[in-house]
Image: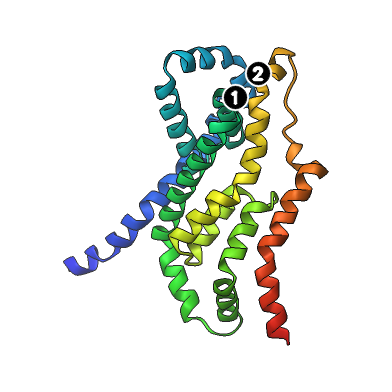
Amino acid sequence: MSDMTDTPRPGLARRLPLIAILLVAALGALTLREHLSFQALAEHREALIAFRDTHLVATVLGFLAAYVLIVAFSLPGALVATLTGGFLFGLFPGVLFNVSAATLGAVLIFLAARAGLGERLAARLDASEGRVKRLREGLRENELSVLFLIRLVPAVPFFVANLLPALVGVRLDRFALTTFFGIMPGALVYTWVGAGLGEVLARGESPNLGLIFEPHILGPLLGLAALAALPMMVRLVRKAR
């Protein structure tokens, strides 16, 4: 009798981090949107600058911790956090802080999803036959290209790009590597916008947050995406021959 009651517990324990993330994400979407907004940043910019100037190390650590939590729990405000990194710390080291914190947060949600659902789902995919098996094998052959693509193409939501690799059994080291370097171009753009945010706010204006979709920015990003897809296309051509 005790064996029957004890068996579900390990599975439930593995799912608890993912369940907690989903609950906090839902709660945060309802309650934190106004507090993690561009307007909130504009209202508190002077206090943030004053605290940074007197407590630089504490500001860096607090910023990194807040950014990691925003990404790990999929809270609203990731873009504002990236702008804040540039606003407080400049293009460099701001971009390094932004990319590092975003990558760590992504790794945490990746591990939670893989422990909760990913390992079992990946095992089922490996044991499957037919079209599903061919799809899984194709993903494994082109894993790095696909992972870079979903990071470089702005149309893929960050939350989705964190969950999908965990659900199909991607290795942690490959996920972390492609996340760090894949988000760097976009992070560089928005950190640069954040670095000039002080002048924009002083004029009473709002930054151009759609800058990444401008042709002179989107073009190079799509070029990087095409470069990431090149090995995959070469394999497909070789198979076709």
Where is residue 92? Give x, y as percent: 56, 32
Query: Which amino acid type corresponds to the residue marked 2 in the rendered image?
Result: Gly
Where is residue 116? Give x, y as percent: 40, 58
Task: Classify mark 2: helix, strand or loop.
Answer: helix
Q: Is residue 189 toward the left or the right of residue 20 in the image?
A: right
- Residue with the most extreme bottom position: 241
Q: Nearer the viewer, residue 21 or 87?
A: 87
Q: Is residue 94 toward the left or the right of residue 108 in the image?
A: right
Q: Nearer the viewer, residue 49 or 9?
A: 49
The quarter of the image holding the C terminus is: bottom right
Say whether residue 33 is visible.
no
The answer to whether marks 1 and 2 mark residues whose Cβ atoms lie closer than 8 Å is yes
Q: Which residue is mark 2?
A: 198
- Residue with the most extreme right position: 215
Say whether residue 118 is visible.
yes
Q: Quadrant of residue 40?
A: top right
Where is 106 relative to 51, above or below?
Answer: below
Query: Which amino acid type corresponds to the residue marked 1 in the rendered image?
Result: Phe
- Residue with the most extreme front position: 92
Q: Which residue is mark 1?
A: 87
